[in-house]
Amino acid sequence: MMKKIFIKTFGCQMNEYDSNRIFDTVKKIGFEKTDVLDETDCYLLNTCHIRDKAKEKVYHDIGRIKKNFRSKKKPFVIIAGCVAQAENEEMLKREPYIDLVIGPQAYHKINPKIEEYFEKQKKLEETDFDAEAKFNYLNQIKNSSSKVSSFLTIQEGCDKFCHFCVVPYTRGPEYSRSFNEIIDEAKNLSFNGVKEITLLGQNVNAYNYDNYKLSDLILEIEKIPTIKRIRYTTSHPRDMTDDLIEVYGISKKLMPLVHLPVQSGSDKVLKLMNRKHLISDYIKTYERLKKINSKIEFSSDFIIAYPGEEEKDFNETFQLIKNIKFINSFSFIFSPRPGTAASNLKLIDKEISKERLEKVQKQLFEHQILMNKSLENQEINVLVENKTEENNKFFGRSEYMTSVIFDGNDEDVGQVIKVKINNSNQNTLFGEKVRKSEQKVA
């Protein structure tokens, strides 16, 4: 009899990729996926440690599970991901309801660890760093993802050691997967029906395997006929190399949205963060990309009120936002991560931090709204992902990752079609499919 596993994922796209690969793995020992919590035999929580109170969210979630199964047989509970890596054995001591803690570089060991638990009924922790063994194992198991748009991890870990970031401690040093293994997985995803691939890495543009770089991967994946779009995330400004910049002038399938986290517009704050790049470098990259392809737009990440950020530094960040006009960005007030160099720094006053964040977000949202507004009454290319549950509408994304809701047909799913945008709001475009007889002559 098949056992049922319920997988809940917090955090980044890499965790989503990992959750899919974990399921591909546990299928081998008799698990099937369920979306019904009450019927699960195994509850797996894939965790993220980037945001504040991530650890406490795990314990709150476990509390809800305990309540849910108070009068039922307890499920086998696995905590995976970055919180598992950071907290490891402490989680087993603090919460007896947890049975297995496994870090993100040890997923190749999940099946034997599950089997060991059921054999010995002993709580287990596995948080060794072994990215090579992990991917060597996963390469033998086909990626079963068949969504129109899917993720593909090409690189893990980080050697940058930004003072605010926990990634080097939870994902380990930078590791790049084999070029051929990645291409094989991309071809397999294409065979499954995937039309768009997003290449993932903590420092995705630091990818380097036998002198193959990210640009080489993009141009090779582009040769797969049924892959229509290619994206990548997350990048570091220091790794925007000449070859990667130049590929934007060559590739027909690489989307014109560059997500390049700057974190601050102040060189002083960047130095405090140990970011190892200057604003002048960032602007040069921006200008080069815009010159190569005028359609390119930027999105970014911003940490507001980093310890040591003065009013002058904040104003420099605000001015950078106004100048570049980022169309979609993430912005947060600094929150310390245990174990990082910035964990014990003196925080900026909460009210000042909140005021700065509100000002930044207002400006960022204004750019987002104006970008969407500029597309009204225009025909744009949309990759159709699925039919929505409400109102018989269809959902897809623009070249800039903006959500598009429109009237279409079932046969449009998986296709890039023309959609006329009728109206918009901050996050979404609304329109209707352009029939072939209505399409403008190029």
Image (cartoon, rainbow, N blue to C red):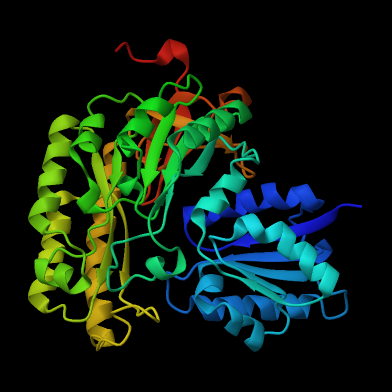
Residue 177 is situated, as x and y percent measured from the top left of the image, at 45, 44
Q: Residue at x 84, y 56 (%)?
A: 3
Q: Residue at x 38, y 78 (%)?
A: 337
Residue 55 visible in the current orientation: yes
Q: Quadrant of residue 302?
A: bottom left
On the rendered structure, is 371 left or right of 56? left
On the rendered structure, is 310 left or right of 95? left
Residue 434 is situated, as x and y percent measured from the top left of the image, at 44, 21
Residue 424 is situated, as x and y percent measured from the top left of the image, at 38, 44
Q: Nearer the viewer, residue 45 or 169?
A: 169
On the rendered structure, is 301 left or right of 266? right
- Residue reaching furthest to the right: 1
Q: Is residue 261 above or below residue 100?
A: above
Residue 406 visible in the current orientation: no
Q: Nearer the viewer, residue 237 or 147?
A: 237
Residue 281 is situated, as x and y percent measured from the top left of the image, at 11, 52
On the rendered structure, is 434 left or right of 95? left
Q: Quadrant of residue 287?
A: top left
